[in-house]
Structure formats: structure tokens, C-alpha cells
Amino acid sequence: MRKIEPLLAILLAGAMIAAAIAAPWLRFVLTIALAKGIAVMGILLLLRAGQVSFGHALYIAFGAYTVAFLAPRFGDAMILLPLAAVGAGALGLVIGLFVTRYRQIFFGMLNLAMSMVFYSLLEKLYAITKGSDGIRVEIMPVAGQALDRITYEWTIFGIALGLAFVLGLLLRLYLASPMGEALAGIKTRETRLEFMGVPARGVLLSAYVMSAVLGGIGGALIAMTSRHVTPLLAYWTSSGELVFIAILGGAGGVLGPFLGAAGYELVRVYAAASFADAWQMILGAVLLLVILFAPGGLWGMAARAIGGRGR
Amino acid sequence: MAEWFQDNGLLLGLALLDGLSSAGLIFLVAVGLNLVFGVLRIVNVAHGSLYAIGAYAAASIGIFLAGLGLPDWASIPTLILSAALVGAILGPLIERFLLRRIYAQEEVVQLLVTFALFMILEDVQKLVWGVQPIHHETAMKWLGTIDVPFGADFIPFTNYQLFVLPGFAIITLVGLAWFLRRTLTGRVIVAVTTDREAATAMGIDAAKIFLLTFTFGAMLAALGGALSSPTAALVPGIGAQTIVLSFAVVATAGLGQIEGAALTSLMMGLGRSVAVYFEPELEVVVPYIIMVLVLLVRPQGLFGVTETRRV
């Protein structure tokens, strides 16, 4: 399964491009799915270490607001994306230094606390953030080229797809490296890891910073696509959504987050269109069914369908 | 300082009274969550939904019975009975048909199952009770107000918020402490919390204890909701707000700690309402600041016990 993963990735990317050409509204949905998939890769990293962050929407919101704030000044996607990534990484380092001292529920809840603090700052500091009205993001030039709306949307879609590919590849390398393997060690028995001389906290911290960077990139892409940022991006239910996508996709390969995100966004769009008042209920039911009857998530299902072993 | 007190003393007094009543509500919800976590080792995100459903059910049962000519004095027992009803129906249903299937699963998966349940129940509320605010304040009106002497002045305050809410919290605290320490069932619950394996090896029926504890926790959540219903209009989203606050209380208090939950609820209730009156922007942030400060000094929570590291 691991061997044919790159092939599957290319197939999935091809399917996404075909879908985006076939139906223009899908282009929007899939760009958001790719952006969330990138962020969910960060959740996957932490899940490797057995830690659930219930507050990673913080980094998505940070990336998104970075774009919204700085777009008037440095209005170019190619400048804003790295800025959002570096900013989120720096924030992740500061918060990570604190939260990586904790494990399990404390880790989860402290992350939740951080994101809720950020959420309320975004909501209450109306003079700076325009509160729950949010900030509009104008169409911006990409690499110095001013683009019309359709070309712009295609460009962002392309950037998201390209980033998903490159970052997915990097994540794969990282997970196979000694440092990535040490993450799994934190999950099984951290004390043993330390007896071997591996600084467990350092390993977790580096994974945490990486996950923050991935969140920042995802958030920047979301802001560029939806062109409107609100504090809701940082609310705890958005963080829950990220963990949801990670489990829906399956915690095995790096393709899981993207399968999960695409599935999640599509179900959400259809559910919202057909049952406006009950889309959450449908998503919740889907999640329950996946957990109870398809424990490997979509990735596990795909693996079984192909006949290999999921992982 | 003296001058500031002269200007703001009354406001501070009002904030303290308000904080006391909201601390009572927070405690009722958080202690249920903490109890359930202690025994089942599951962070129940849907605990917030039970709170909301308890509130809605109490309000509509109250409105219905008032229509049949229920005397005003009976409105408080009605609140309690509605809460017991909600807990007794939903608690066993959720434990039997959902949680029981996932006790062997990973922590992430358990968390997500309750998150999925939360999403489902959130829409169920909207479908059953709609999105218009519901208000039924007979219980609070019937008890009238009291002028609380404060220095040379008086602060008018409702009896319901001053006596009923903190009163119920204190009864619950004392009753629960007595129940857990002095009765056989209570001691069995403590035994399962401390060491599930040893307890089952001694012949304790863990399944029965799980069902009992979860139902009891659900009743406490519903009671918190029911008692809050006369004080404010019910709108969608109260469950989501309540649960994040309860998370903060549980993590700050230390897992499975009843007295810790009481002290933390008091700190957070007071802190939050002082913020409401003096720095409203900080209202939502205060509980998390308290949490972070406590966990910096005591990483296992205020009353938490450090677990021995296993190799």
C-alpha cells in the first residue's frame, strides 16, 4: 500500500482536477478541502505521538487573519503564504514550549484553551478585527501578476494542490525518519524513549511546530479562497472538525487527510444543500458510522478495496 | 484604592454575587463531567448537549404545565424533575448503545464519538425547539428579589440566583462527597476510578458502575441546564459554550476531583463575572488564564494526583 501511495496521490489529484473542470463550484469546495487537508496533516503528526490537539483551529485562524491583515500592505499570495507559515510556526513554538509539557487530556485542553483565547480576542477586539463581522479579503495578485477572478481561483487551486503534494511528500519522509519514528515511541511509552537518550519533549515540540506551520498554510489558503475571515475559524468546533477529518480519512498514510477533507467537504455541501437545518446531524452520523463500522477510515477502506494492508 | 472602591464598590459587590450564582451552575455541569471522566476515562463532549437539552426540556415542560394551571411554587420542583427525566432517558441510551461499543478503543476515537454525538444532538435541539429564544422565568420571579446589604448600600438581587443556584451546588458537593466516601456504591465508584483493573478483579461489575455513573453525570448536566433556564433566554449554542468552560474546570481541578471542581468553579465563576463588569472583553478569556496559571504551577491540576511513570 505504501508503495503505491504516490500513484494513488496522482490519481486523486487527477480526479480533483477533473471534478474542478467539470463543475466550477466544486473548484471552490476542493480548494478548501485541500487547505484543510494540509492542516489535518499536522493533526496526523500529533496523533502519531498519541496526542490530540483540540485547538489547532488556532493556527488556521492565525494564518487566515495574517492574510486578511497583511493583504492590503503586501498584496501578493506568494509573499503572504510564507508569512502566514512562518508566523504560525513562531506562534506554535511559543505555545508549544508550554503545551508540550503536558500529555493526553491536559495537552488537548490546553490547546483548546489557547484557541478559545484567540477566538475571543478576534471577536472582542472589534476595532482591530471587526469582530464577528470578519474581514473581507480582496482578490490579490499572485507572483506579481494581477489576475481576473476565474484565473485567480484556478491559481489558488493549483497552489493548494501543489503544496499538498510537496508537503505530503515531506511529511512522508519525516514520518519515516528516526525523528518521525520517535513520535510513535511517545505514544507507546515515553519513558523508554528517554532511557534511550531521545529527548521526547524536543521530538514532540518539533512535530508541534510543524503542525502549526501546516495549520498556518492551510488557513492562508482558506482565506485566499473564501475571501472572508471570521473568528469562527478559531472556535473549538472548527478544531474538532480537523480531528474529525483526520479520523474520517484514516490515520495511516499522508493521503488520509486529503481523502478525509474531500469527503468531509462534499458531505457537508450536499447535506447543507439538501437538509439546511440538519447538516451537522448528518456529518455526526457519518462520523459515528465510520468509527463504528470502518475503523481505518476512508484510507483503510481504500486499502481493503485494493487488497493491500492499510497503513 | 479606597477611592476606586468608593466608585466601584457596588459594582464589585454585584459582580461577586453574580459570580457566586454562575459558579454554582458551572460546578453542577463540571462535576458531572469530571465524575464521568474519572470512571469511564472518556471526555464527554456531548455533556454540553445534555446541559442544553436539560435547559430546553425544563423550560418547555414548565411552560406546558403552567398552561395547565400549575401553581408558581411548583416550578422549582418541576425544573428538578425535568432534569432527572432527561438524564434518566438519555444517559442509559447513550451509555448502552454508543459508549459501550468503544471502551476498548483509543482515546481519540472515544473523544470523537462524543463529538459526533454532540453534533447530532446540537441539530436535534434546533429541530425540536427551533432557533427562537425560549424563556420561562416563573421559578425566578416567584422567589422575588432581596436587597443584599453591601457597606452602606444595598444591592438588589434575585433570591433564585443568590440562594437556589449556589444552594444546589453546595448540596451536590456535600451529597456527592458523602455518597462517594460513605456508601458502598460510592466506594465502588471510587475504586473503579482509582484502578479499574484491580476493581474488576475483585468482582466489581464495571459495566453496571459505568451505566450508573454516566446516567448520574447526565442528570447533573441536565440539572445545571434546567436550573439555568429561568435566568436567561435559551438560544442554540449554549451547549457549546458550557462544555468548553467545563473542560477548563475539569483540567484545572484535576481529574476525578470533586472538591477541586468546586474550588475551580468558584474561581472561574467569580473571575468571569468580575471581568464582565469591569473588562467585558476579557470575559471569555479569564477561565483559560486561570487554567494556564494553575497548570503552570501544578501540571496535574489543583487537586490532581501525579501518576507514577511506568517503564
Image (tube, coloured by chain):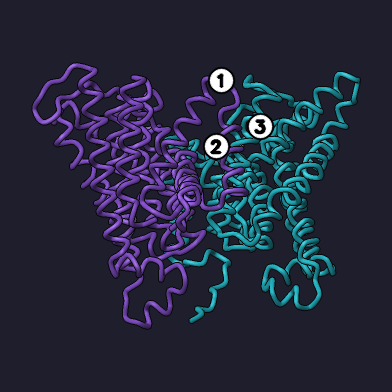
Chain colours: A purple, B cyan
Q: Which amino acid is tagged 1?
A: Ser
Position of residue B24 measured from the top left corner of the image (x, y, whole percent): 67, 46
Task: Please report the residue visible at 51 percent of the width from the left and 42 percent of the height from the top.
Answer: B274
Q: Is residue A124 left or right of residue B238?
A: left
Residue B73 picture quarter: top right
Query: Where A10 falls versus B212 (above or below)?
Result: above
| Residue wearing tag 3 | B156
Q: Which mark is residue B247?
A: none
Q: Which amino acid is tagged 2?
A: Leu
Task: Please report the residue visible at 47 percent of the width from the left and 36 percent of the height from the top.
Answer: A264
Query: Where B40 falls versus B247 (above or below)?
Result: below
Crowding at mark 3 (Cα within 10 Å: few <14, some 14-19, many 20+): few
Crowding at mark 2 (Cα within 10 Å: few <14, some 14-19, many 20+): some
Q: Which amino acid is tagged 3?
A: Pro
Question: Which callout, 2 or 3, points at the residue further toward the start of the chain?
Answer: 2
Q: Nearer the viewer, mark 1 or mark 2?
A: 1
Look at the image and tell me whether residue A166 can be seen. yes
Query: Which chain's residue wears label 2?
Result: B
Disc 1 is placed on an element classified as helix
Position of residue A27 measured from the top left corner of the image (x, y, whole percent): 33, 25
The CA span between labels 1 and 2 is: 53 Å
Q: Mark 2 and mark 3 in contact? Answer it, CB < 8 Å.
A: no
Front-lying residue, A122 or A34:
A34
Position of residue A20 measured from the top left corner of the image (x, y, whole percent): 33, 25
Q: Is residue B80 left or right of residue B124?
A: right
| Residue wearing tag 1 | A274
Position of residue B191 measured from the top left corner of the image (x, y, whole percent): 73, 72
On whether disc 3 and disc 1 are found on a single subunit, the reply is no
The CA span between labels 2 and 3 is: 11 Å
| Residue wearing tag 2 | B10
Query: Which chain's residue wears label 3?
Result: B
Disc 2 is placed on an element classified as helix
